[in-house]
Amino acid sequence: MKPTTQFNETRNGLRMPKTDFGYQVGSIPSRGRCYGARRASIRAISREYFKNEARSTFATEAAFFSVIVMTATVPLINTVTAMAHLVRSFAAF
C-alpha cells in the first residue's frame, strides 16, 4: 500500500507536510576510531597552507589592497570638497 502524505495548515494558508518527531537513528557500534587511511587534521592543513602558499600571495594581495584603497580615497576626497562647497553656498544665503 502506498503511503499517503499528511499536511498541516499554517496560519497564512500554506500547506506543510507533517513531520515525524519520533524518529530515532540507530546506533552503529564503534570503538571510537576511524576506519581507513588516516587523514590530515584541519590544523595541519591550515598550517601547511600558511607556511607555503599564503606567504607568496600576501605581497600581491597587499599591493592590490593598497591600490583599491587609493582608488577609493579620490572620490571620498571629492565628495568632502563638494559637501564643503554646498555648505558654504547655503551659508551665503
Image (spheres, rainbow, N blue to C red):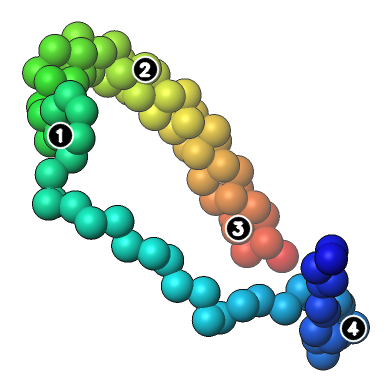
Does residue 24 appear left or right of residue 90 in this picture?
Answer: left
Where, quadrant-wise, is the C terminus in this rendering?
bottom right
Tell me the amino acid under the disc marked 3: Val
- Picture coordinates of residue 24, whole percent (x, y): 45, 72
Q: Residue at x 32, y 62 (%)?
A: 27
Q: Is residue 33 above or below residue 53?
A: below
Query: N-terminal of the two: label 4 or label 2?
Result: 4
Query: N-terminal of the two: label 2 or label 1?
Result: 1
Where, quadrant-wise, is the N terminus in this rendering?
bottom right
Q: Residue at x 17, y 24 (%)?
A: 37
Camera-nearest residue between 76 and 93: 76
- Picture coordinates of residue 14, whole percent (x, y): 86, 77
Q: Nearer the viewer, mark 4 or mark 3?
A: 4
Residue, disc 4: 13
- Rounded to the nearest whole Å, what is the CA distance between mark 4 and mark 2? 52 Å
Q: Secondary structure at mark 1?
A: loop
Q: Are marks 4 and 1 in contact (CB under 8 Å)?
A: no
Q: Quadrant of residue 78?
A: top right
Residue, disc 2: 64
Can residue 13 be seen from the camera position used here? yes
Q: Nearer the viewer, mark 3 or mark 1?
A: 1
Q: Is residue 1 above or below residue 89?
A: below
Residue, disc 1: 41
- Picture coordinates of residue 17, whole percent (x, y): 77, 74
Residue, disc 3: 87
Query: N-terminal of the two: label 4 or label 3?
Result: 4
Q: Nearer the viewer, mark 2 or mark 3?
A: 2
Query: N-terminal of the two: label 3 or label 1?
Result: 1
- Rounded to the nearest whole Å, what is the CA distance between mark 2 and mark 1? 32 Å
